[in-house]
Image (cartoon, rainbow, N blue to C red):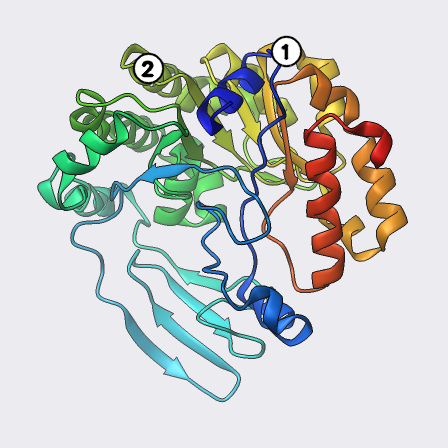
Amino acid sequence: MTDLDRFIACMDYQPADRRPNHELGVWPQTIERWRQEAPQAVKDFTWNWFVEEPGIHLDRREYFPVNFGFIPPFEPEILEETDAYVIARDALGIVTRALKAGSIGGARMCMDQHLAHPVRTPEDWPGIKRRLMAALPQRYPAHLEERIERWKTRDYPLVLGENCAANGFYWRAREFMGTEALSTAFYEYPGMMHDMMEFFADFIIETSRPVLEKIQVEYFVLNEDFAMKSGPLIGPAIHREFIFPRLKRMVEFFKGHGTKYFAVDSDGDPTLLIPPMMDAGVDTVWPIERASNVSPQQWRKQFGKSLRLWGGVDKRILTQGKDAIRAHLREFIPLIEEGGFIPTIDHTVPPDISWDNFRYYMDSKMVLLRGEYAKV
């Protein structure tokens, strides 16, 4: 079977030679550790997990690069710098304080502290709109027609937008306003929030339309991250009023243009928001962050086979050695057999996971994906 055949079979609960082998990525700090532990084993890695890395045997996927961001972006500016931290305005117009300790390639060991955001009141919103004009030529890659012709004969899944390219309704509004201000804006400025959600749906649809009128893709991911360990950052009522009708319209557009599956990404525990997402037509939720006391087994029992699941491998267990990893992976055998589930680590791989443990996990997972359950 091809990677495309295998992916479709899994998503449609059909038998296959094996289930897909996907992962999300690694922290730069993890790469640094692994280079120290196994320099020969990792020396040829590109660390781009959209393609197969040597010896890891990831299934191939390609991502149609579309720029859903600001055009023009804000001009990045360092506002203050000390030996310990940097305060800067980034291309999104967000002012943050970032610790320097442990930073590698701009990636830090902890989240930045957000100090200011570009939208404070409805008067600021029109200025953001002007940076999000849909379907501008510069939103699409060079040599577009040549790429499309090549993709028409592909034997692997094609995805519209690289990971975190099409950040969702909540995600973008939080970038505009910050978590605290956004939490009250639904009540203080409901008119602006309705306009923001409607505008963003139009923006994603109209920016995607020129691509989807020329080629169909297997799936599209809307990155939301609207949940924490204890539950979602907005309630179902807010989702139903502000996001649901626009999400439903977006899903209908994508599926009406041949997109097979529509996925939503959120860390934390978004369980309360899964019913309205499914009502809007969402097929898949990932990465099922186990530290938030959720699991793919729990969600399959609660939501049935209409909800496909990606993720669910507890990254914390990968620090505990081979016996713990093996026992954890065996928990997924019923879901792997059933289909509609692609096991991956429940986010990017952090630096407390050794190269030996990671390789044992990947090797053991591949055995399970082939259905050779007695060997693990």
> Image quadrant of residue 304?
top right
Residue holding disc 2 = 249
> Image quadrant of residue 23?
top right
Q: Residues within 10 Å of mark 2 (few under 14, many from 20)?
A: some
Q: Amino acid at mark 1?
A: Lys
Q: Amino acid at mark 2?
A: Arg
Q: Does the image show residue 230?
A: no
Structural distance between the alpha carbons of marks 2 and 1:
23 Å
Residue holding disc 1 = 305
Residue shown at the point (11%, 39%) measured from the top left:
136
- Pinpoint residue 310: horizontal percent, then vertical percent: 60, 30
Q: Residues within 10 Å of mark 1 (few under 14, many from 20)?
A: some
Looking at the rendered structure, the secondary structure element under dot 2 is helix
Q: Is residue 319 above or below residue 247?
A: below
Residue shown at the point (28%, 42%) measured from the top left:
65
Residue shown at the point (62%, 13%) measured from the top left:
15
Left or right position of 101 against 136: right
Q: How many numbered discs sit on the rendered protein?
A: 2
Q: 278 or 33, which lies in front?
A: 33
Among numbered discs 2 and 1, the one appearing first in the sequence: 2
> Image quadrant of residue 79?
bottom left
Q: Residue extending furthest bottom? A: 83
- Pinpoint residue 344: horizontal percent, then vertical percent: 63, 39
Left or right position of 232 against 82: right
Which quadrant of the figure contains the C terminus?
top right
Q: Is residue 171 above or below residue 209?
A: below
Q: Of the numbered discs in the image, which one, if any, rests on residue 24?
A: none
Q: 100 or 119, which lies in front?
A: 100
Looking at the rendered structure, the secondary structure element under dot 1 is helix
Q: Does the image show residue 79?
A: yes
